[in-house]
Image (cartoon, rainbow, N blue to C red):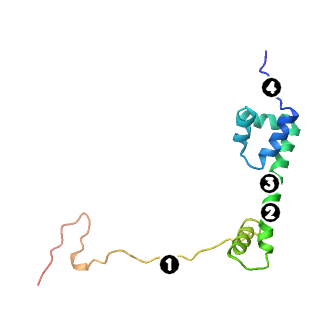
């Protein structure tokens, strides 16, 4: 006899939608009492679960996007507005920030008179 497949009931599917906005899949699976692997299998087998999960994630994205755009639309120029605008442009507008880093050569300068070559006889130094 084969292994019994887990099927989520309507109440659990509603929970999946609500939790998808806040939790990663492994935590949702833990909440409903299955392994993450089993939850992925359930999402493949039960279109209602997949759709509920997608709706929950989308609702969270909409809420965060609306909040972000609220900060961006503020009349006053605040540091929060600047941060929100920059975040939006980096994540949605394809902007990148390139930094120019100037490096300084910190190699110690050794006078040539005391430098030695590897695998050769030591050089003699004249002090004087």
Q: Residue 51 or 1: which is nearer the viewer?
A: 51
**Mark 4 or mark 2: which comes first in sequence?**
4
Q: Residue furthest front?
A: 76
Is residue 93 placed above or below 4 in the rendered structure?
below
Image marks 4 and 2: residues in contact by CB distance under 8 Å: no
* 22 relative to 45, above or below: below
Q: Quadrant of residue 26?
A: top right
Q: Locate the C terminus by quadrant.
A: bottom left
Residue at image coords 78%, 60% = 64
**Residue 27 versus residue 111 in the image, above or below:** above
Give percent across and percent down for residue 41.
78, 34
Q: Which residue is mark 4?
A: 5
Question: Mark number for residue 102?
Answer: 1
- Tell me: residue 42, above or below residue 79: above
Q: Earlier in the sequence, mark 4 or mark 1?
A: 4
Q: Going 74% across and 40% down the picture, which residue do you hit?
A: 28
> Where on the picture, by quarter, is residue 112?
bottom left
Viewer-side label of 4, 1: 4
Name the residue beneath numbered marker 3.
60
Residue at (41% x, 77% y) in the render: 105
CB within 8 Å, label 2 to label 1? no
Question: Which label was assigned to residue 65?
Answer: 2
> Is label 3 in contact with label 2 (beta carbons under 8 Å)?
no
């Amino acid at each position: 006899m084969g292994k019994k497949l887990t099927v989520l009931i309507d109440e659990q599917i509603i929970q999946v939608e609500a939790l998808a906005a806040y939790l990663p899949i492994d935590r949702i699976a833990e909440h409903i009492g299955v392994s993450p692997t089993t939850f992925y299998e359930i999402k493949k087998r039960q279109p209602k679960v997949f759709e509920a999960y997608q709706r929950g994630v989308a609702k969270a994205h909409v809420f965060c996007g609306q909040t972000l755009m609220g900060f961006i639309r503020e009349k006053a120029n605040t540091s929060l507005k600047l941060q929100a605008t920059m975040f939006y442009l980096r994540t949605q507008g394809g902007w990148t920030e390139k930094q120019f880093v100037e490096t300084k050569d910190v190699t110690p300068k050794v006078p040539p008179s005391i430098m030695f070559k590897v695998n050769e006889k030591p050089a003699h130094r004249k002090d004087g």
